[in-house]
Image: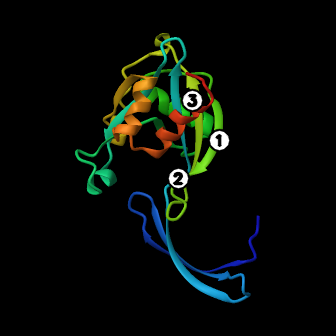
Amino acid sequence: MQNNKVKIYTTEILSDNWYTLRKVTYGYLKKDGAWQTQSREAYDRGNGAVVLLYNISLKTVILTRQFRMPTFINGNGDGMLIEACAGLLDKDNPEDCIKRETEEETGYKITEVKKIFEAYMSPGSVTELLHFFIAEYSHAMKINDGGGVALEQEEIDVLELCFDNALQMIETGEIKDAKTIMLLQYLQLKNIL
């Protein structure tokens, strides 16, 4: 969809070390009819997918814990973050991506996922659109220990938590990850667990 209120003037790559950081200078047509030149930086890491695994009979969820450098430098104690399983799409569609990531990170092989919505997590600076899924799991689906991919420098702990405890961990600040909070609250609002 074309937005005729925006004209891109220049795009400059500031960094392409891990992902791509661009500085975009553009004109924006204001409500009073005047064009205003603005400049913003946008971090492009691609789009991603996230899933919350849940077990109705056990009333449990599967989460992960791993070190996240940006949270560490922003004062998050040891930098460890409890999250729902997630990953970048790379060249996969969202459903295939999240099935692969689930197996790599948690060790569970899931075959059915339900997409519940899409959301931009930090639209003021990051281009990523995140595809949100939920999926039921059972212990019979556990095919390995998970923990991530060594080549991607992942070292992930797999946590099976009582759903009520996970919700409480939002209030205590033990869970601070937005995508995880959104998924836990989705299960709560829909009375799934």
Please indicate whether residue 75 sits to the left or right of residue 179 in the image.
Answer: left
Q: Which residue is mark 1?
A: 117
Looking at the rendered image, the disc whose residue lies closer to the viewer, 1 or 3, is: 3
List x then y, in percent, for residue 56: 55, 16
Which residue type carries mark 2? Met
Which residue type carries mark 3? Leu
Placement of 45 over or under 13, stated as above or below:
above
Residue at (53% x, 11% y) in the render: 57
Q: Which mark is residue 33?
A: none
* Badge 3 vs badge 2, beta-carbon distance below 8 Å: no
Q: Which residue is mark 3?
A: 187
Looking at the rendered image, the disc whose residue lies closer to the viewer, 3 or 2, is: 3
- Residue 82 seen from this side: no
Within 10 Å of disc 3 (Cα), the crowding (few <14, some 14-19, many 20+) is some
> Distance of mark 1 from mark 2, alpha carbons?
12 Å
Placement of 121 over or under 61, stated as above or below:
below
- Residue 151 seen from this side: yes
Q: Which mark is residue 121?
A: 2
Residue at (37% x, 34% y) in the render: 169
> Distance of mark 1 from mark 3, alpha carbons?
13 Å
Q: Kindly state the secondary structure of the residue where label 1 is placed.
A: strand
Please indicate whether residue 145 sits to the left or right of residue 125 in the image.
Answer: left
Q: Earlier in the sequence, mark 1 or mark 3?
A: 1
* Badge 1 vs badge 3, beta-carbon distance below 8 Å: no
